[in-house]
Image: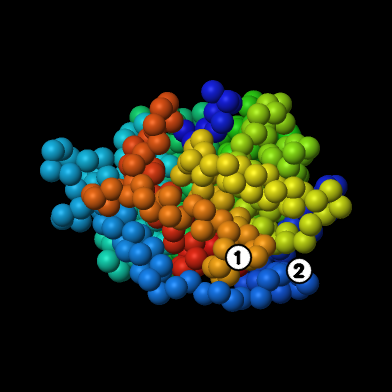
């Protein structure tokens, strides 16, 4: 799943990659400190207009209502897969781990928490589903302990592992008592599984094993899950992050884009946005001598100037929003050279037009169409990034 198909989907030496890492135990506030030390950082200004914010927040709310099957938000012709399942999961069996993780992240980005808020019960049930995948799985000798495995799900794999780790880590701060202990215990296992699955290249592949295929989008997903887990107080092996970011660094091409893997040179806007968001997430705001960040941003701009309807639309724009917000968020005017103001003026109007009367966002078409759960969850997260409700989105 989420495999960025081979079409048809700050220079850093190894010692410099360490500069990407915020010291263990640091919180997201450390990223703000790093940005404040950057003499090129933009000052806040040109705030979001009230009308625009209201429209954006309404779209978020309608999308979350769809995911939870709020009366009046669903088609009448059939039971839509946007309705939360009886087991607490979301979407089809074939990708239930990743879809549930993204859906619960979307609900939390709107303001609901584990058992509290407009969709608190749905969040609680979804988290229980993910926790059960680790707690109820019997060892079979095939996968590491801590792998979010569901028998009928052949698509989520290590993408799902990264998203599920991110979801549980994001929920930990609002959970208390035995529930918090349960989530933390699962996170420790999930992180260990990720660490044991890194390949010799520093990247990660689709399966939880240290040998075999590796590629950029999986590496991004697990790196972001690890960062969230570390912010939540879980010990993460520093060298795993160092090697993962170095893998991404090595995958940049001469045109500034980031390619599918070290052995597959096809690149895309989506992979480039995802890689840049990972660098920013680990505190790298100043560019390196090879202009890694500048060239990556330049590539993204060149793609969007021509067309915003790009392959892997929702995945790509989710990471595009994340990356651009980290660069100079809070400045909403498209005038001048600020990146966020320009990006959102190009993408948000088109994204909002894709929301249907039922609250969901029209899915991507083709082989990698996982239905409206995927498109709606990614769209809600993309629209919610400026609210910074999820700690991982904070600048």
Q: Secondary structure at mark 2?
A: loop
Image quadrant where residue 288 sits: bottom right
Q: Mark 2 sits on what residue?
A: 40
Position of residue 31 in the picture relative to residue 186 (left or right):
right
Q: Secondary structure at mark 1?
A: loop
Q: Which residue sits at x=24%, y=50%?
A: 357
Q: Which residue sits at x=27%, y=66%?
A: 118
- Which is nearer the eye, 25 or 162? 162
- Which is nearer the eye, 173 or 220? 220
Lower position in the chain sequence, tag 1 or tag 2: 2
> Furthest residue to the left?
76
> In this picture, is 326 found above or below 132?
below
Task: Compute the Cα span from label 1 to label 2.
Answer: 17 Å
Label 1 neighbour load within 10 Å: few <14, some 14-19, many 20+: few
Label 2 neighbour load within 10 Å: few <14, some 14-19, many 20+: few
Residue 72 position within the rendered picture, expressed as x and y whole percent measured from the top left: 16, 54
Residue 191 position within the rendered picture, expressed as x and y whole percent measured from the top left: 57, 49
Position of residue 93 in the picture relative to residue 216 (left or right):
left
Which quadrant does the C terminus fall into? bottom right
Residue 117 position within the rendered picture, expressed as x and y whole percent measured from the top left: 30, 69
Which numbered dot is residue 335?
1
- Which is nearer the eye, 98 or 217? 217
């Amino acid at each position: 799943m989420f495999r960025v198909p081979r079409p048809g989907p700050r220079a850093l030496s190894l010692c410099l990659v360490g500069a990407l890492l915020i010291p263990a135990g640091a919180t997201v506030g450390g990223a703000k400190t790093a940005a404040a030390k950057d003499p090129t950082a933009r000052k806040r200004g040109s705030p979001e207009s009230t009308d625009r914010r209201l429209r954006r927040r309404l779209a978020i709310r309608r999308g979350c209502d769809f995911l939870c099957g709020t009366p009046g938000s669903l088609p009448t012709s059939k039971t839509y897969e946007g309705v939360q399942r009886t087991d607490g999961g979301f979407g089809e069996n074939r990708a239930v781990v990743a879809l549930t993780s993204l859906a619960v992240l979307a609900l939390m980005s709107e303001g609901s928490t584990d058992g509290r808020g407009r969709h608190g019960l749905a969040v609680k049930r979804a988290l229980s589903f993910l926790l059960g995948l680790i707690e109820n799985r019997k060892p079979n000798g095939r996968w590491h302990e801590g792998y979010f495995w569901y028998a009928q799900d052949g698509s989520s794999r290590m993408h799902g592992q990264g998203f599920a780790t991110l979801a549980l880590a994001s929920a930990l701060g609002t959970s208390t008592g035995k529930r918090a202990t349960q989530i933390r215990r699962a996170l420790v296992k999930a992180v260990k599984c990720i660490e044991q699955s890194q390949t010799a290249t520093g990247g990660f592949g689709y399966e939880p094993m240290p040998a075999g295929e590796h590629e950029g989008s999986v590496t991004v997903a697990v790196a972001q899950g690890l960062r969230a887990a570390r912010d939540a107080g879980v010990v993460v092996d520093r060298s795993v992050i160092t090697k993962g970011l170095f893998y991404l660094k090595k995958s940049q091409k001469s045109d500034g884009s980031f390619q599918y893997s070290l052995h597959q040179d096809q690149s895309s806007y989506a992979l480039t946005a995802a890689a840049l968001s990972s660098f920013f997430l680990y505190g790298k705001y100043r560019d390196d001598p090879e202009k890694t960040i500048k060239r990556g941003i330049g590539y993204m701009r060149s793609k969007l100037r021509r067309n915003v309807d790009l392959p892997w639309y929702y995945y790509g724009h989710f990471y595009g929003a994340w990356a651009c917000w980290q660069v100079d968020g809070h400045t909403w005017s498209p005038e001048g050279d600020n990146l966020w103001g320009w990006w959102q003026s190009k993408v948000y109007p088109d994204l909002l037009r894709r929301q249907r009367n039922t609250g969901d966002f029209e899915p991507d078409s083709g082989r990698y169409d996982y239905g409206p759960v995927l498109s709606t969850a990614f769209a809600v997260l993309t629209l919610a990034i400026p609210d910074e409700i999820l700690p991982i989105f904070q600048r």
